[in-house]
Amino acid sequence: MRKNKSVIDLTLDMVSLLPPDCVECCFWETYGAAVPGVCREPGGKSQWISEIISSGFIPGKVLLVDGSFAGFIQFAPSESVPRLKKLPYPSPDPDSIYITCVYVTPELRGRGYGKALLMESLKSLSGSDWVAVETHGMRTEMYFPPGPQGFFESCGFRKIKDHPHAPLLRIDVRSLALWFRRALSAVRGVVLLPSGQQSSRGCEKPCT
């Protein structure tokens, strides 16, 4: 049976839908908690989300399947992610958006929902003024956030700084915009040519 999925903005109203462990986790939002990852105060994650939204940025997306919570992705300007200052991994570009976590409920994993969530998020960022979207791909602890290296690379990210455990991955916003324009043109039967001219021949091979 086909399931209906929708992706909506991660706002304060959506925080209550997140798994309790995620709501209580402030690993990315702090770097000095007494217990690594635990919010110092109740509502720590909500406070961080509120601050990011107040700056004019929506810090993620929530996935609903048949109207029920199925996963979420969290991201923010890298300069707004305190933990990045303490990680022993390659540092992201200060002008990039950093993905801190991609989560799908266990019973729905392996069905493409994580990729759909990530691609919808990238689409929302494709028209922005940010230089790139970056994250660390986990090479050894693959179930640790942000997520497995192979998962991000399958969605177009490329390795720009190597690391034995968590290489830095990147996808340029400019290339994102072109990618989604090509995908849209494929649906409409139009090919985007380098010169800016258009052809109605349709795509001879997948634009993705």
Image (cartoon, helix red, strand yellow):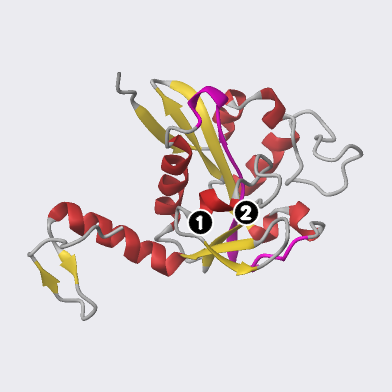
Q: Which mark is residue 137?
A: 2
Furthest residue in direction left, as rendered: 200
Quadrant the C terminus occupies: bottom left
What's the residue type where badge 2 is placed? Gly
Q: Residue at x 64, y 62 (%)?
A: 168
Viewer-proximal residue among 192 and 51: 192
- On the rendered structure, is 18 left or right of 115? right
Q: Percent position (x, y) of residue 120?
A: 41, 46
162 w.r.t. 206: above or below:
below
Tag 1–tag 2 contact (CB < 8 Å): yes
Q: Secondary structure at mark 1?
A: helix
**Above or below: residue 76 compared with residue 35:** below
Q: Nearer the viewer, residue 64 or 40?
A: 64
Looking at the rendered structure, the kind of residue marked 1 is: Glu
- Label for residue 153? 1
Does residue 30 appear left or right of residue 202 in this picture?
A: right
Please give the range of residues in magenta: 89-109
Residue 91 horizontal/vertical position (percent)? 71, 65
Residue 122 among those drawn in magenta: no
